[in-house]
Image: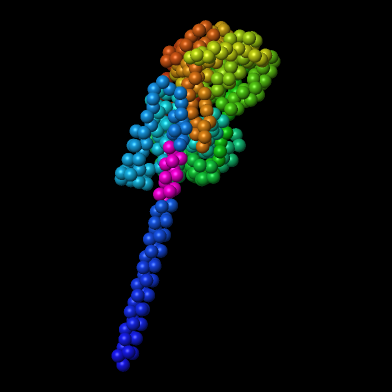
Amino acid sequence: MEENNSELEQKTRDKKLQRFSTILLVIAILLFVFGSGYRFGEHQEKKKVESTRSKVEKITAIKTDEKLDLEMFWNIFAILQERYADQGKLKPEKMLYGAIKGMVASLEDPYTYFLTPKENQKSKDDLGGKYEGIGAELGMRDNKIVVVTPLENSPAEKAGLKAGDIIIAVDGESIKGWTITQAVNNIRGPKGEIVTLTILRNEKSQKIKIKRDQIKIKSVKLSYKKEKECKKNCSQIAYLKVSQFGDTTNQEWDRAVLEVKNKWKQGEIKGLALDVRSNPGGYLEGSVYLASEFLPNQKLIVKQEYASDPTKEYRVQRAGLLLDIPMVVLINEGSASASEILAGALRDHDRAKLIGKKSFGKGSIQEALDLEDGTGLHITIAKWVLPNGDWINSKGIKPNYEVENKIQEGNTIEDDTDSQLNKAIEVLLK
C-alpha cells in the first residue's frame, strides 16, 4: 500500500516537473523570438544609421583648409536616437536630408539649394511644363473665379468646361472669397482622381465631374493683337508669350516663329511683341537660342564669368528668321534670369524697346545636379553680364517705356485692361 502511494506521488511529481519544464520551454521560446525580433529591429535601425553615416562621411570627404570634426554631428545623432521622446519621428534619411539642407542654406544664397527626390522630380516636371490637374486657365472677374479657357484636349475641355464659366464650388465647398491661388491649389490634384466643379453658365448652375490627368503646358503661345478701339480693317501684331525656358521651349518656339515669319513676309502683321513678363527663367541656353532669332551671326548675347575659370561667351551661332521685324519686349518685376538675358541682349544691340516695369534682377547662373537616390542640388557656379557689361544682379533692367498695370480689385488682367500690352501695340503700329 505504501509502495503504491509512493509510486503515485512519484508520478505526480514527474507530471509537475514535466509541466514546469514545458512552461520554461515556452517562456524560453518567447524570449528568444522577442529577443531575435528586437535584435533584428535593432540591427535594421543600426543599418539605417550606418548607411546614413556613410553617406554623410562620403559627402564630407572634401578638400578644406579647416579640420572638420564630424564627431559632434554623430554625438547629437546618437543622443536623439537614444533619448528623443517620439522615436517614431527618428527617420535617418529625413534627418540626413535636413542636415544637408541646413549645410547648403548656410551659404546664404537663395539660388543654391538641396532637393529631396520628390522635390527634385517636381523641379524637373516644372521645367518640362507638367502638372497634374484639369487643364484650365482661371481668372477673376468681379470677385468671381472664371474659366478663361480650357486647354486643348485637356480633361476640362473633354468634360465640357467652357470659357466664361463661373466656378462657385469645388467638391461641394463654396469658393466665395477664394483667391486664384486657393482655387488652383484645390482644383489641382493627383492624376486619376475626380474633382467636381459647380459652375454658373447663363445664370444656371450645374455640376461637372472632371478626372484629373497629367497636363502638359506649352511654354510658348502665339496669338495676334490689334488696337482695342479698332473695329474693322485693323492692323495686327504677332504676340509671342514665353512663360519659361524649359525642356520643350525651343521646339515650341520654332513652330511659332515659322508662322510669324510667313505672316510678316505676306504683310499680314506690322510687328512682334515678345512677352516675358512673370517668366522666372530656366535654361540659359534657351535664352541664347531665342535671342539668336533676332540678331546677326556672332553677336554677343551674354558672358558667363566664373570665380577662377576663364569667361565663357555665348554668341549667335545660327541664322535667325526674324532679323528685320519691328519688335518690343514686355517685362515686369517677375521677369528673371534667362528672361533678363534675352531682354537685355535685345536692348543692348538696339534690336528692341522694352516696355513694362523694371525686371527682377537675377544675375547668377546655377547648375542643376542629379545626385544619388534621386536627390538634386542647384548650385550657383557663375555670374552673367550683358553685352554692354552690365551685371544686373539685385538691380534689374529698366524698360524704355515704364508702364504700370493697374488691376481693379476683384479682377485679373485681360487684353482690354492690359496697359503694357496696349502700349506695345501702340508703339508697333504708330
Q: Nearer the viewer, residue 297 or 358?
A: 297
Which residue shows up at 32% across the image and 40% down it? 79
Spot occupied by residue 248 in the image (x, y as percentages of width and height): 60, 27
Q: In the image, residue 409 lies at what x, y percent?
A: 39, 26
Q: In which quarter of the view is residue 100 placed? A: top left
Main SS of residues in magenta: helix
Q: Is residue 50 magenta?
A: yes
Q: Is residue 28 visible?
A: yes
Residue at x 44%, y 41% (from the top left corner): 50
* x, y percent for residue 354: 51, 12
Can the viewer see residue 185 in this picture? no
Quadrant of the image occupied by residue 295: top right
Name the residue nearer the viewer: 342 or 324.
342
- Specify the segment rendered in magenta: 41-53
Based on the picture, tell me whether residue 35 belongs to the magenta stretch.
Answer: no
Location of residue 109 by image quarter: top left
173 left or right of 155? left
The image shows residue 373 at horizontal and vertical percentages of 51, 37
Q: Quadrant of the C terminus?
A: top right
Quadrant in which the N terminus appears: bottom left
Q: Nearest the camera: 174 or 300?
A: 300
Q: Is residue 15 left or right of residue 417?
A: left
The total of numbered circles placed on residues is 0
Residue at the extreme bottom: 1
Query: At 40% from the left edge and 34% from the top edge, which residue is drawn?
Result: 98
Residue at 49%, 44% (x, y): give it: 196
